[in-house]
Every structure is written in structure tokens, then in C-alpha cells.
Amino acid sequence: MSVEALIFDVDGTLAETEEVHRLAFNAAFAEAGLPWDWSPERYRALLATTGGKERIAAHQAGLPEREAPGLAPEAIAALHRRKTAIFGSMVEAGALALRPGVRRVVEAARAASLDLAVATTTSRANVQALCLTAWGRPADKVFDVIAAGDEVAAKKPAPDVYLLAMARLGRAADRCLAFEDSRNGVLSARAAGLRVVVTPSAYASHEDVADAAWRLASLETAHLPQPLARALRLR
Ligand code: XBP
Ligand code: MG
């Protein structure tokens, strides 16, 4: 297996972000005077819709008519901008840590001269916040390429964001490996022709990720499949 580039999902893969996203959504709702407070169970169901704006719209669409506030797309976008700002402050305050093994894999990939990319549904601002706190460096100093949700026509499980990452890397799918945590992410990467390493996140632990080539508990060195460990020169 020839591996020249690693392409990482962010939410759930680099860090267990979804609980922080949930709290940021709820804080933005409270600030806006909306009577919405997503429980972990409700949020787990809502994660079937990728993208924060799309998730808010899906929630509103599922409410009985008399309970729906009738938020137009611009109002949803403004609410989501506030949620992104709250999420950024929470990350800056130390709400997130990298998942086990992630730091070592990224360091080893650099040392082995592999390219590093991000293919995420979330915004560039959120990737930046995570990189600044977890690595103490801006996102473009950690990753060679960043492809984010609002830069593509269709979010995961569509392949668009992975295709964009590969186009920016200038690499074909058979030279890249995708890292994901969820079913929608695995479907997106597979639709782009990529092999996938999946490390299911807390919110995605129940999902069917059988399309991934490898399912691991984490990216700690002991769990890495031989071809990946070899490409990273870890074993
Ligand atoms: C993650 C998401 C994101 C986050 C929130 O999916 O669906 O929507 O929950 O991010 P994946 P925003 O990990 O498969 O990319 O609110 O910034 O959209
Ligand atoms: Mg994810």
C-alpha cells in the first residue's frame, strides 16, 4: 500500500468535539430566547444531519407548526454564526483535547514526509480554534490543505469535501488514506474512492461503519494496522 497523504475528518476524529458543539448550540439558542435545549439523546439523532445550519433547520422542520419559530435561512445563519463564536471561546478555554494517538500520527506523518489534510463539515474557524489550542499553531501550519464544509456544494455523506481536499493536495484517491469517526464520514470518503480508517467517536459508537477498511478503538500506535504503521515508520 503506497500512502502519500493522510486526510482527517475533524469532529469526532481529531477530538471528541460533538459534546462541545451541543453545548454551544444550546447556549446560542438560550441567548436568542429560543426554548430549545438539545439533550445528548436528541443531539445523537440530529447528528444524522451534517452541518450546523442544516441541523438547526432539520430540528425546526421537525417541530409541530405551533412550536416552530419560523426562522428564515438568514436567521438560521446568524444563529449559527453566534454558535460558532461560542464554540470558539469554549475551545480557547480548553474544552477540547486531541483523541489518543492523534498527535503522534500527525508528527510521524510529518517526519515521514506524508502530506496532511483536513476534510471537514465544520467551518475553517473551528479547525483554527482546535489547532491553536491543541498544537499551539494555526491550522495551516499543522495541515498542508484544509477543505471545509461551506466550501463545497454538498456536505458529507456526499464526497465533495474529500474530492476538494484531494484536488488541493494534487493526489489521487489510491495514494491517500481518510480518517473518520462516523457513518456519514465513512460514506463520504468511500464515495470519493478513499480507503478509510475509522475510530468511532462517542456520539457515533452505535453507527454502521462496515465500509471502512479498518475499525480501531483509537489511533494509538498499538492499534494501527501494519500498512499504516509502516507508512508512518512507527513499526
Ligand atoms: C460534523 C458535523 C458538524 C458539527 C458542527 O460532521 O456534522 O456539523 O456537528 O459543525 P463530520 P458546524 O465530522 O462528519 O464532518 O456547526 O460548524 O457546522
Ligand atoms: Mg466526524
Image (spheres, rainbow, N blue to C red):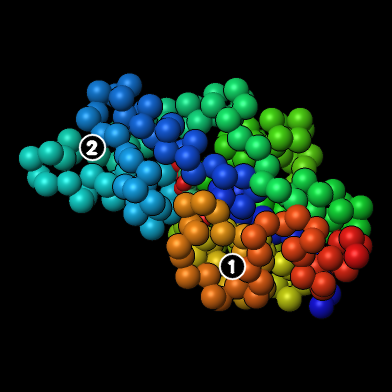
- The image's mark for residue 71 is 2
Above or below residue 188? Residue 122 is above
Q: How many marks?
A: 2
Q: Position of residue 38 (x, y in %)?
A: 32, 39
Res. 164 in view:
no
Q: Nearer the viewer, residue 32 or 196?
A: 196
231 on left or right of 173:
right
Q: Position of residue 159 (x, y in %)?
A: 54, 67
Above or below residue 37? Residue 120 is below
- Foreground mark, 2 or 1, reads 1
Which sits earlier in the primary sequence, circle 2 or circle 1? 2
84 on left or right of 95:
left
Q: Residue at x 37, y 28 (%)?
A: 28
- The image's mark for residue 217 is none
The answer to which quarter of the image holds residue 165 is: bottom right
Q: Residue at x 92, y 52 (%)?
A: 111
168 on left or right of 22:
right
The answer to which quarter of the image holds residue 23 is: top left
Q: Position of residue 205 (x, y in %)?
A: 50, 59
Q: Residue at x 23, y 44 (%)?
A: 60
Instruction: Tell me the element at label 1.
Output: helix
Above or below residue 104? Residue 24 is above
Q: CA distance from mark 2 to mark 1?
A: 32 Å
Res. 110 in view:
yes
Q: Nearer the viewer, residue 136 or 16?
A: 16
Amino acid found under the numbered disc labelled 1: Ala
Amino acid found under the numbered disc labelled 2: Leu
The answer to whether the residue labelled 2 contacts the one labelled 1, judged by CB atoms less than 8 Å apart, is: no
**Pointer 1 residue:** 189
Above or below residue 201? Residue 39 is above
